Amino acid sequence: MIRLLSVLTGLLMSVALYAGTIIVKTPAELKTAADKAQPGDVIILKNGEWKDTRLTLKCEGTEKQPITFKAETAGKVRLTGNSWLKIGGSYIIVDGWLFENGFAGSNPVIDFRANKNTVANNCRVTNTVINDFNNPRRMDENYWISFSGKNNRLDHCSFRDKKNMGVLLAVILDDDRSRENHHSIDHNHFGRRPPLGSNSGEIIRVGVSQHCQFNSNTQITDNYFEYCDGETEIVSIKSGGNVVRGNVFKESQGSVVLRHGDNNTVTDNLFLGNGKPGTGGVRVINKGQWVVNNYFYQCRGVDFRSPLSVMNGIPNSPAHRYVQVTDAVIANNTFIDCTPASFCEGSDAERTLPPDNVWLVNNIFYNNTDSLIYRAFDATNGFNFAGNTVNKNVKQEVDNGFAKTPFNGKSYALYALPLPAMNQMATLSDSLQQVASQRLGHPLSEQVGFRDGGLIQQLRKNIATCGAPWIKINATGKQPAAITVNCRTADDVYKALEKNRPVIIKLTGKQYDLTRPFVIGSYARFTAGANQFVNITTPAGQRSAFEIAGNGHLVLQQIRLDGAGVKATHFIASNHEGSAQHYNLEIRNSAVRNLSDANGCTSIFYAYKSMLADSFVVRNSVFSNNQCRGFIMDEEKDDKGYYNAEKITISQNIFEKQRGILLQVYRGGNDESTLGPQLTFSRNSITDCKAPDNAPLFVFTGVQITDIFANQFTNANPSATLISYKDIVRARHRFAQNNLTGSGELQKNGFVTETNNTINSH
């Protein structure tokens, strides 16, 4: 009897334990389970592919008995195709899902709002991954995560490779249901986001300019941001009362930007630029912002991306523009081998109000790399400089409040804390310390700089706990090795490309008669015999001979191509549909000749609108007798800061008898959120090249950085403009060490610096 009672008790306990567990295999079953879900239920999604799954979960759990929607095995429930998830209700947990090989259209991939009337409160998404889940077209905008409601949490999730337009994670404050929300965004891994080539490439945005006067009180803590290069703002704060604490930013080309809203706090973070160009720190705008106890290592951004940038404001500014910086506290930070801080940044005819009542105290600026610690673009009498320490070998004559002192040791490796041999600290007022205790939970340290080596080590350890533990989202993954295929005819080439895998194509024939473009959707290297020209022919009306699609990487290497038979509009072109996937082009140790506009071929390369090249490289090649334009990237005429290539390198080439604009790059508008395009044109020989109708031979519109150096220009666009520079926003152009003989002049602006050029007449 006792044994029978024990068995019955065990069975009853088992039934009770699993009574709320429901296994679902299809979206329809999941919807039914969600509609009937009761507090404490656990709905298990069976492993497998859930294609074109559009889900709305509306149910009500409780704090002690949430409703959980969990993958049978984390990462094995794969949402693909046109899929998205909406959450509405209370105390809902989503655990272990994977979004890949798909897109969400105009919807967020995960939305903490079921519909206009039902937001999520006290809900959680955890242990979940969104990987390269982009809309097919780059300009089709959406978020990956959209927060509405209050007290929601996103934790231990991983995100990588957002490439289409739109913020990765947006916190929405459009009504009282979502303000003062106290959301938590913690322990996530925000992996690579390549440059977007436009605005809206942020990782996190909290609020928008229309709602910037409301408090959000969102907590962004203990996350790992790695290679987040989408645009100049990694985290864009556009509301009040937010905290950015305990995060690690590794080699990310941007900053935490306190763009709108007041009384935000950035504390206890590591900014590890590791010498990467464009890596920033914190940009300060508006009232009552605090930047305290952060560690900046080799952050090499300039201007808006400086490791510390304190902006000028606009008189009587509306809240959505540039409110003057006032009542800011910047204390106990350490900057090691960083580019100079920028005070009164953005000073111009509109932004005329320097910061006021800014406490910049007890910081360390240790620099063995630069001659300057800071740059000031307007009056700094609104700054209270005190107790800041600078190493002695910095050449700049610094203001009072910066003391040059010896340090313990001569150089400092990563994570080492440089400490001054003499402490010249500022004593802080009781009123300031009282505010500090309220905002930080402790007073400000009256020691100089970031001193907590234990915190550094803890944050380094935290990196391993960020993101979904079942996936290493930061690993790029190895592509299969390229196979080598000998191709005697165009049909052979089509067959080699159709598998869309890495391939090396050796052209063993003498002539290739194309009936359609060679479409490049993966890595494809074309090569041929060193001393033989290969003839390419195409029918009239074809867009191009070579078309680079999304994820395409075209390499022409050690190949000589004759285009006399090319009647396609362009010799090489990007895909015209505006793919979200990026591409690359390389031409190395090659030759291209005899392309002609008279035959219908208008350019050597043409970038169609809305698609972005990560890199465009032309080296050690010869371009001769091409009676057409050269490299044309000018379709982005919306004047919103869009452009077609992030990095352009054209070096050590020969251009002879070019008849058409040789290089044209366009980035229009006054947007200041991007680093590119970046152009290097160096050590080239340009001989007897002319553009028609007195057009410039080179046209650069809004290109952010150009470096034109050590080139030989001979009879290059004589009696006309050689290079036309056109800029609205600040740019950096160097024209140096060039030799010009019988060539045109520069049409330049105030951003062009000329040094050591030689100008000869015929």
Image (tube, grey):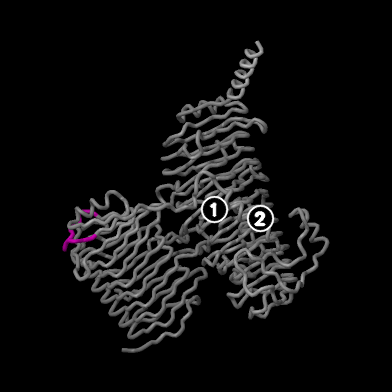
Above or below 597: residue 25: above
Determine which residue is flagged by label 2.
Answer: 261
Q: Which mark is residue 694?
A: none
Q: Is residue 81 magenta?
A: no
Question: x and y percent of residue 333 in the render?
Answer: 68, 64
Residue for point 56% across, 69% down? 302
- Amino acid type, label 2: Gly
Above or below 134: residue 198: below
Q: Which mark is residue 203?
A: 1
Pick the front one: 277 or 692: 277
Q: Which mark is nearer the camera, 2 or 1? A: 1
The C terminus lies in quadrant? bottom left
- Mark yes or no: residue 377 visible: no
The N terminus lies in quadrant? top right
Residue 511 occupies quadrant: bottom left
Residue projecting furthest to the left: 510
Above or below 720: residue 12: above
Alpha-carbon span between mark 2 and mark 1: 18 Å
Q: Is residue 510 magenta?
A: yes
- Mark yes or no: residue 197 visible: yes
Question: x and y percent of residue 481 in the render?
Answer: 33, 54
Residue projecting furthest to the right: 430
Residue for point 20% across, 59% down? 538
- Amino acid type, label 1: Ile
Span shown in magenta: 506-516
Side of 641 where 91 appears, left or right: right
- Of mark 2 and mark 1, the one earlier in the sequence is 1
| Callout 2 secondary element | loop
Residue for point 45% across, 38% down? 78
Question: x and y percent of residue 434 in the render?
Answer: 81, 57
| Callout 1 secondary element | loop
